[in-house]
Amino acid sequence: MIVEEKENNTKKKQVGGDSDLRYLSPLKIETKIEQKYCYFEKRNIKFIDYKDPTFLIKFLNAQGKILPRRITGTLQKNQNKLNFAIKRCRQIGLLPFVTDDLR
């Protein structure tokens, strides 16, 4: 319940009831933030093999799209190598371009 009052050309809002507070204040949810790391740097992988589709499927979502860096946590140079390897694997026919479910 919101009530507006005009006094000296200013508006004041009063909030009444618990149901209104739920919409006006953000919910406080504690989430555990996991530290992102580069998969390839941690395991000291220098070359990403494009002939290994079982490894490359880890970096694809269910529709077959390549997961972005903000989700996987890989570095830019390794993400570029990964994208190149996935695209090359698709070209030689080991990975599908689009699918309903890879897993």
Image (cartoon, helix red, strand yellow):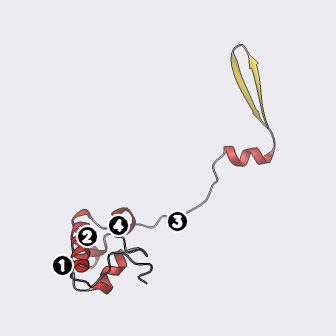
- The image quarter containing residue 79 is bottom left
Spatial CA distance of label 1 from label 2 is 13 Å
Classify the position of the N terminus by image quarter: top right
Question: Going from the N terminus, do you reach mark 4 or mark 3 first?
Answer: 3
Q: Which residue is mark 4?
A: 73
The alpha-carbon separation of the residues under discs 1 and 4 comes to 18 Å
Residue at figure coordinates x 36%, y 79% from the top left: 58
How crowded pointer 4 is (Cα within 10 Å; few <14, some 14-19, many 20+) is rated as some
Q: CA distance from mark 4 to mark 2?
A: 14 Å
Is 17 left, or right, of 95 in this rendering? Answer: right
Contact? badges 4 and 3 (CB < 8 Å): no
Dot 3 lies on which element?
A: loop
Q: Secondary structure at mark 1?
A: loop
Mark 1 belongs to which amino acid?
Phe
Mark 3 neighbour density, 10 Å: few (under 14) some (14–19) many (20 or more): few
Q: Position of residue 56 (x, y in %)?
A: 30, 80
Residue 47 is labelled as 1
Dot 4: element:
loop
Disc 1 crowd rating (10 Å Cα; few below 14, some 14-19, many 20+) is few
3 vs 2, front mark: 2
Please give the residue where the numbered disc 3 appears in the rendered image: 32
Which amino acid does the dot numbered 2 rest on? Asn
Is the residue under label 2 in contact with that under label 3 (CB below 8 Å)? no
Between discs 3 and 2, the one toward the N terminus: 3
**Pointer 2 residue:** 83
The residue under the point 71% across, 49% down is 22
Give amino acid for label 4. Answer: Gly
Q: Quadrant of residue 88?
A: bottom left
Position in image of residue 72 (x %, y %): 36, 69
Quick one: label 2, few (<14), some, or many (20+) residues within 10 Å? some
